[in-house]
């Protein structure tokens, strides 16, 4: 899961970064609206935008308006200190998906983040099933035939991306975009190593991670 936080309160932003990273997300942060707008124009791999309204340089409403004007369907969770009905209505009318007034519970925010990301991917549940493989996105637990599979944080991230796009090709570049924050250097060779480790742990029975040479990977479910 890749999340962009647009928040000018550094203390709050630090708390959000710690909380969401601890839940396994790759999280990037910008402190003003112009930076948010630029980031959203250049990176299409975000799964969610957490957007403060009172941003310097470009108001949160304008960031949201521009995002939707470009045709982007990225889920947006608005955070604001002003919890007026008029502001909530305006944000929702501009295309926001959810709204939280400050102060708020980090536990509730995590739950709303998971729900919005699931909705953005067309999933009704946090549970993804692929043959005998089951992955709980909320608990970040993978099982095969009911038995837990021990995976590292990076392996869990790879599995989540592949499961969300099961049957479709995912390039190495897309994996890096979805798993890595700004400034985090992960080479294509490193992705190959992570894929190799993941294969050894989950390729049982009909589950297979196919390599399409020069293009990427595809999580398949073989017949039988």
Image: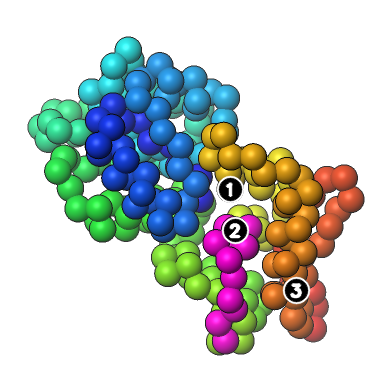
Mark 1 / mark 2, whichever is N-terminal: 2
Secondary element at image label 1:
helix
**Mark 1–mark 2 contact, CB under 8 Å?**
yes
Most foreground residue, 40 or 198: 198
Q: Which mark is residue 141?
A: none
User: Which residue sits at x=35%, y=25%?
Assistant: 31
Taking the image as shown, residue 142 lies to the left or right of residue 215, namely: left
- Which image quadrant is residue 90 in? top left
- Total number of numbered labels? 3
Q: Which residue is mark 3?
A: 200
Check disc 2: other Cα within 10 Å, few if <14, some if 14-19, many if 20+. some
| Residue 224, x across and y down, in percent | 79, 83
Between the residue at mark 1 and the residue at mark 2, the CA separation in whole angstroms equals 8 Å
In the rendered image, is residue 47 in sight? no
Above or below, 103 against 10 in this view is below
User: Which residue sits at x=89%, y=50%?
Assistant: 213
Q: Which residue is mark 2?
A: 154
Q: Which residue is mark 1?
A: 179
Most foreground residue, 33 or 115: 33
User: Which residue sits at x=23%, y=23%?
Assistant: 54
Q: Is 137 in the magenta?
A: no
Taking the image as shown, residue 132 lies to the left or right of residue 199, namely: left
User: Which residue sits at x=21%, y=43%?
Assistant: 100
In the rendered image, is residue 206 in sight? yes
- Which image quadrant is residue 57 in? top left
Secondary element at image label 2:
helix
Mark 2 / mark 3, whichever is N-terminal: 2
């Amino acid at each position: 899961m890749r999340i962009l936080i647009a928040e000018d309160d550094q203390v709050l932003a630090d708390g959000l970064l710690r909380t969401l990273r601890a839940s396994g997300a790759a999280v990037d942060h910008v402190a003003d609206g112009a930076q948010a707008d630029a980031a959203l124009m250049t990176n299409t791999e975000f799964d969610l935008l957490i957007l403060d309204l009172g941003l310097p340089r470009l108001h949160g409403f304008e960031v949201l308006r521009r995002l939707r004007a470009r045709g982007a369907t990225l889920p947006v969770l608005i955070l604001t200190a002003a919890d007026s009905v008029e502001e909530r209505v305006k944000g929702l009318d501009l295309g926001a998906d959810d709204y939280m007034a400050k102060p708020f519970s980090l536990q509730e925010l995590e739950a709303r983040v998971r729900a919005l990301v699931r909705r953005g991917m067309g999933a009704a549940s946090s549970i993804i099933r692929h043959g005998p493989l089951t992955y709980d996105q909320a608990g970040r637990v993978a099982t095969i035939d009911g038995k837990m599979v021990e995976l590292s944080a990076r392996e869990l991230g790879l599995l989540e991306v592949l499961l969300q796009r099961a049957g479709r090709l995912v390039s190495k570049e897309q994996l890096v975009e979805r798993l890595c924050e700004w400034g985090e250097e992960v080479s294509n060779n490193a992705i190959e190593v992570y894929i190799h480790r993941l294969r050894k742990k989950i390729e049982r029975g009909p589950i297979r991670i196919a390599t399409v040479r020069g293009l990427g990977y595809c999580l398949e479910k073989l017949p039988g």
